[in-house]
Image: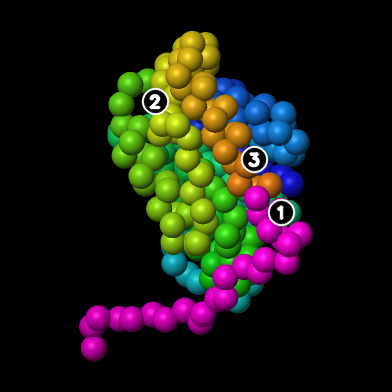
């Protein structure tokens, strides 16, 4: 079993990475393989709704988004991390997730995310964490991905990685999140061994209210 942890911060070894490392360490202790995937600090274009992904099964902008979606097929769980910028997720992680989830769905690759557990980790100096937490969790809710929680909202505080490490409650939240994710993945594995099938899927119904 494997979990990929996405670092949506502009700094490869910054505060978000520090939080994700704590989660990854706990997952490893629980026997779960991990990979921390940094989206980088180069500009990431937003979705232009061209729907090219419907035909080609990948985003028209061939960048880190397509790289991640390709990796996703071999992953069992996901954790997306972001710092807070003006009480919301960064522009980079927002563009990244818009395109990741839209291209995966419209490209007919919903199985890369469908029923796979996901979680959000938020880092801030002081505030804006809960708004960002709500924002990113919506991606999972629309894709039938079980959302994994911790003992508190999944967040850490600090202006530097050293500050984050001193946030004892925040680091504990990361460890509990890791154990909760591992538990859920093991439950899924046990269910498969018992022959429990995934919920039946219906054809998607789109209702337009303008006639």
Q: Position of residue 9 (x, y in %)?
A: 50, 32
Q: Nearer the viewer, mark 1 or mark 3?
A: 1
Q: Is residue 159 left or right of residue 12?
A: left
Q: Decide: marks 3, 2 in contact (CB < 8 A)?
A: no
Looking at the rendering, the stretch of residues picked out in magenta corresponds to 187-211
Q: Which residue is mark 2?
A: 124
Q: Decide: marks 1, 3 in contact (CB < 8 A)?
A: no
Q: Earlier in the sequence, mark 1 or mark 2?
A: 2
Q: Secondary structure at mark 3?
A: helix
Q: Residue at x 33, y 21 (%)?
A: 126
Residue 155, label in figure: none
- Is residue 195 part of the magenta span, yes or no? yes
Q: Which residue is mark 3?
A: 182
Q: Residues within 10 Å of mark 2 (few under 14, many from 20)?
A: many
Distance between mark 3 and mark 2 Cα atoms: 25 Å
Q: Which residue is mark 1?
A: 190
């Amino acid at each position: 079993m494997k979990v990929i942890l996405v670092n949506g911060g502009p700094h490869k070894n910054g505060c978000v990475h520090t939080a994700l490392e704590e989660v990854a360490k706990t997952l490893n202790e629980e026997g779960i393989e991990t990979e921390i995937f940094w989206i980088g600090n180069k500009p990431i274009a937003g979705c232009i709704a061209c729907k090219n992904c419907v035909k080609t099964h990948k985003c028209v902008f061939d960048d880190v988004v397509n790289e991640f979606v390709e990796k996703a097929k071999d992953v069992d769980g996901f954790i997306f991390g972001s710092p807070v910028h003006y009480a919301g997720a960064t522009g980079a992680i927002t563009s990244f997730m818009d395109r990741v989830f839209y291209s995966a769905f419209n490209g007919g690759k919903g199985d890369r995310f469908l029923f796979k557990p996901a979680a959000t980790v938020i880092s801030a100096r002081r505030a804006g964490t809960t708004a960002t937490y709500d924002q990113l969790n919506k991606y999972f809710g629309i894709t039938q991905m079980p959302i994994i929680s911790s003992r508190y909202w999944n967040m850490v505080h600090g202006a530097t990685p050293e500050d984050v490490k001193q946030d004892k409650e925040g680091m504990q939240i990361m460890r509990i999140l890791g154990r909760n994710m591992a538990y859920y993945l093991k439950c899924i594995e046990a269910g498969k061994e018992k022959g429990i099938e995934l919920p039946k899927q219906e054809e998607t119904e789109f209702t337009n209210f303008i006639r």
